[in-house]
Image (cartoon, grey):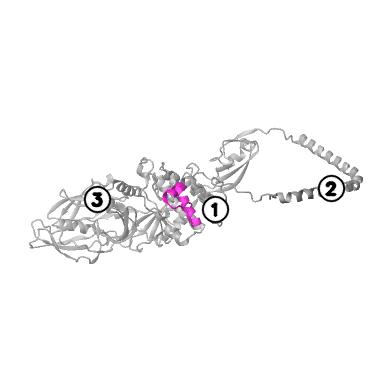
Amino acid sequence: MDKYIGKKLDGRYEIQEIIGIGGMANVYKAYDVIENRVVAVKILRDEYVDNEEFLRRFKNESKAIAVLSHPNIVKVYDVSFTNRMQSIVMEYIDGITLKEYIEQQRVLKWKEAVHFTVQILRALQHAHDKGIVHRDIKPQNVMLLSDGTIKITDFGIARFARSESKTLTDRAIGSVHYISPEQAQGGVTDERTDIYSVGVMLFEMLTGTLPFEADSPVSVALKQIQSTPKRPREINPDIPEGLEDITMRAMQKDIAGRYQSAAEMLRDIDEFKRNPSISFEYKYLSAPLPSETKRMKQTVTPENKKTASAAKSTGHKKKKERQEDEAEKRAPVIPILGGITLAFVLVTALFIGGMFYFNNPFEKVPDVDLPDMRGMSYEKVKNDPMYSQNFKIQVEGNDYSEEYPLGTIMDQDPKPNRKVKVGSLVKVRVSNGPKRVVVPPLAGDEATVAFGKLNDLGLAYSETKTYSDDVAEGYVIGTDPAAGSEVQGGANITVYVSMGGNKKMIKVPDVTGLPLDSAKLMLNGYKLKVGTVTPVESNLPAGTVIDQDPSPESQIETGSFVNLTVVASDTVETTSQTVYIQLPSNIDRVVEVSATLDGKEVHRLSMNPAQTRVWKPAFEGEGAKTVKIYIEGKIYQVYEIDFDLGTATPVDDYSADFE
């Protein structure tokens, strides 16, 4: 049996079962007893704890995901790096890998493949904007939820593109069937490396096959560098031509010919979704098609050569006799044909003369420079003589655009900055401005359903969990902006998801045998309070907890009191006082919060003030004591506690320094 199953890590993560075995780490399903939620815990395998390369990759993953916050990227809740264990606590994904789904379906419908690809590209664009290249994009690292939502995982070999240089250990890293040619050659990688891998995944989803297969990984890598894959429509003719073009451009071996960003690929996919019959001019990988018709050649052999020669001689004789007979018959019509010929010559002469008179074909039409009209008002261009006299401007369509304001030209054909003839036709596309989307009513929806609706509308979202006595856990309380608001396409919507009522049932931890101070810290971590402390005589060390009420494993509400029986001593504290600390709501990240009692630190926890809102530490003592609260080591508030009177009075407030 695995040594971690059944254990509780860091006093809060109860390891339940192993759910994934990777090359350098195993992933476990666990229960977070403090946050009352299921999580995934990724633990570096023992054989790699002393391996600097694997340690670097494992820590790099935690650093990479820590700066990312996107609905299509797995969340990280906690990390722990000690001499004996390296772990990352992540969002638990109840789903299957995209690879498993492809193997089940064999070939995906193109609309489904596009739906998954759009989510992957949005996640990658977010990562690339943060300077992070994943470098191991493959369907095995993409989780699929039951509602069709995609989550990218495993940033173990991700790289901060702008801050690190290539090392020998980075050569040809990643999964060989999905790596880019530059990865296979050990070259420099950037955002376009991930784009190539997305192209391979899209190829696989649409055709049910990989573009390159071979007997060994080295052979596959060589094919990635040297070989040209079949076009997807050769394997599956039902694939729309435009989607094939997008796939093949993403898989360009020349990095300059590839999509330069996830956003650029998304724009073409949006164009394709609006018009599935569209065809892009991405023919880089197309081999010339063979001619569909060929002339048949007759083979002449020595055996048939004599026969052919005799037949030819006889044919010439008969042909000469026929020509003499026909000449006699044709003689009377020669004058008629001569008259027709003369008339034809006259008409032709008149036509050519008129053409020269009205429109000299040899007159040279001057060339002019075609300016860049993108970003200019279409109305201004249309009414400006400089444009209208030199070009024929024709609107061929309209599109939404975040970049180009309403009414401006967003694209033109031919492209600008080239020589064209005066009077040339220039086709333009005019912007409809940013796409406006109405935020749907999501209150009462199950969270994953709500996220799916926002995804379908092209909206990003961030999840904020909060307590609610009116909305069940896991369901949406509301959104910001509120339902009915108009926002730009791609805008981020904050979704407030209920954690249920503030009072939750929790298992009481076993604190017997612990020193009193340690027992208090553990109970506080479980959001429980120390009640009465009863001293008794015993041979055990003074201050040791020998009994508790409620008993271990009992189910009680968070915030409840646990009464302790301890070995008597002069230092045993018999009075408890809870202080309610209102935390700064503008700090929306995990920080260290600590408290001292007369200069001695008695509490230290990691928490997110915006989510915790109110911290309720309990203190033990006699008479009057001073309590100081710190956030990230900086003084926040000061209280005077009178244990005899049971009061906590604010003395100093430095909360303004945290605004």
Q: Mark 2 or 3 closer to N-term?
A: 3
Q: Which residue is mark 2?
A: 317
User: Which stretch is magenta?
Assistant: 194-223
Residue of label 3:
82
Residue 16 seen in the current view: yes
**The disc labelled 2 sits on which kind of residue?**
Lys
| Mark drawn on residue 166 | none
Instruction: Provide residue 576's location: percent of width, then percent of height.
Output: 16, 58
- Image coords of residue 586 (percent x, y): 32, 49
Q: Nearer the viewer, mark 2 or mark 1?
A: 2
Tag nearer the camera, 3 or 1: 3
Q: Are marks 2 and 1 in contact (CB under 8 Å)?
A: no
Tell whether 272 sits left or right of 519: right
Tell whether 605 sits left or right of 417.
left
Please state which amino acid type lies under the numbered disc 3: Thr
Among numbered discs 3 and 1, the one appearing first in the sequence: 3
Mark 1 secondary-structure assignment: helix
Label 3 – label 1 distance at C-alpha: 52 Å
Q: Earlier in the sequence, mark 2 or mark 1?
A: 1
Q: Residue 211 colored magenta?
A: yes
| Relative image position of residue 138 (x, y in whole percent) | 42, 52
What's the mark number on residue 274? 1
Q: Residues within 10 Å of mark 1 (few under 14, many from 20)?
A: few
Q: Picture quarter containing residue 394?
A: top right
Q: Is residue 69 above or below residue 420?
A: below
Which marked residue is nearer to the observer: mark 2 or mark 3? Answer: 2
Q: Is residue 11 left or right of residue 200?
A: left
Q: Nearer the viewer, residue 75 or 388?
A: 75
